[in-house]
Image (cartoon, rainbow, N blue to C red):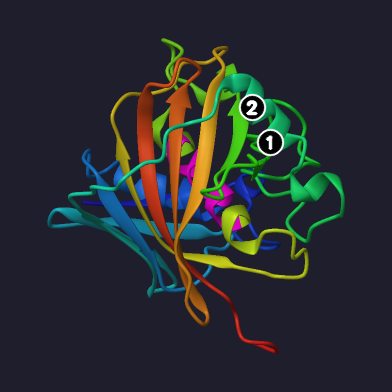
């Protein structure tokens, strides 16, 4: 099964390319179970792309070149206890993008220059805990939901993307990471208009490759979704 899709510029991530969580979530929607999205190349915006079902997985191509592949996965991940909603608001006040203009200030997931309802506006900052947890409040807008008010899965994937990068870069505004892989398990969908808490934490640091975890909770602390991401730090000049 194959279909042509176009990623609207609204769903940008790094300048000139699509938000990784959103794209991987689109592919995962064809699998309908926990999935792992792996990126070969940045996904262009406004171009016709080919989305193919491939056995149990899905692949995204541009001009015959494989960009992203998603496969089913059994994702199990220890998740730190979430902060309260009030603590998440305090953590978001320490979001790096509030102090300096970041190169991804218009990112669909974490861009502070995106208007309400036009981006997710998840601004994760340090929660001030010994475990280094990052957190942010999130009240999903109706533009990201189905007719019943449940947030569509691709937007849950997007919500589980950027925060993990901030947990890794800390206060280094010049540091730049790209999502290379993102695995997600959704237990239940968030509902629009309701406050939620998004968390992120460091799982592993390497030389140029790092791993983070992310999660979405209700304001009462119920786990709705979790993710594990591999991030790559591009070499200088690449």
Question: Which quadrant of the view contains residue 189?
Answer: top left
| Above or below: residue 81 compared with residue 57 | above
The residue labelled by disc 2 is: 87
| Above or below: residue 23 compared with residue 234 | above
Question: Which quadrant of the view contains residue 109?
Answer: top right
Q: Main secondary structure of the magenta part?
A: helix
Identify which residue is drawn at 53% across, 22% down.
196
Question: Which quadrant of the view contains residue 67?
Answer: bottom left
- 70 within the magenta span: no
Q: Position of residue 163 (x, y in %)?
A: 57, 47
Q: CA distance from mark 1 to mark 2?
A: 6 Å
| Magenta stretch in the rendered image | 156-165
Count neighbours of disc 2 (C-alpha within 10 A) and say few if under 14, some if 14 to 19, many if 20 or more. Answer: some
Identify which residue is drawn at 42% across, 73% down.
40
> Left or right: 142 with respect to 160?
right
Identify which residue is drawn at 51% across, 46% down.
200
Q: Identify which residue, 212 or 66, lies in the foreground.
A: 212
Q: Position of residue 101 (x, y in %)?
A: 86, 55
Q: Identify the secondary structure beneath mark 2.
A: helix
| Above or below: residue 3 compared with residue 148 | below
- In the picture, the disc for residue 91 is 1
């Amino acid at each position: 099964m194959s279909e042509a899709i176009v990623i609207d510029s609204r769903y940008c991530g790094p300048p000139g390319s699509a938000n990784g969580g959103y794209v991987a979530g689109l592919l995962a929607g064809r699998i309908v179970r926990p999935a792992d999205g792996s990126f070969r190349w940045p996904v262009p915006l406004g171009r016709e792309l080919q989305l193919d079902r491939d056995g149990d997985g899905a692949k995204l191509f541009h001009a015959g070149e494989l960009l992203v592949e998603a496969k089913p996965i059994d994702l199990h991940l220890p998740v730190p206890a979430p902060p309260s909603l009030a603590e998440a608001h305090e953590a978001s006040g320490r979001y790096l993008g509030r102090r300096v203009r970041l190169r991804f200030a218009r990112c669909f997931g974490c861009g502070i220059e995106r208007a309400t309802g036009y981006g997710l506006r998840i601004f994760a900052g340090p929660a001030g805990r010994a475990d280094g947890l990052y957190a942010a409040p999130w009240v999903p807008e109706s533009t990201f939901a189905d007719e019943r008010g449940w947030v569509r899965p691709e937007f849950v994937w997007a919500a589980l993307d950027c925060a993990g990068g901030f947990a890794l870069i800390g206060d280094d505004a010049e540091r730049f990471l790209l999502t290379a892989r993102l695995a997600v398990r959704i237990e239940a969908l968030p509902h629009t208009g309701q406050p939620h808490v998004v968390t992120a934490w460091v799982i592993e640091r390497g030389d140029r490759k790092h791993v983070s975890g992310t999660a979405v909770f209700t304001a009462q602390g119920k786990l709705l979704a979790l993710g594990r991401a591999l991030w790559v730090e591009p070499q200088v000049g690449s």
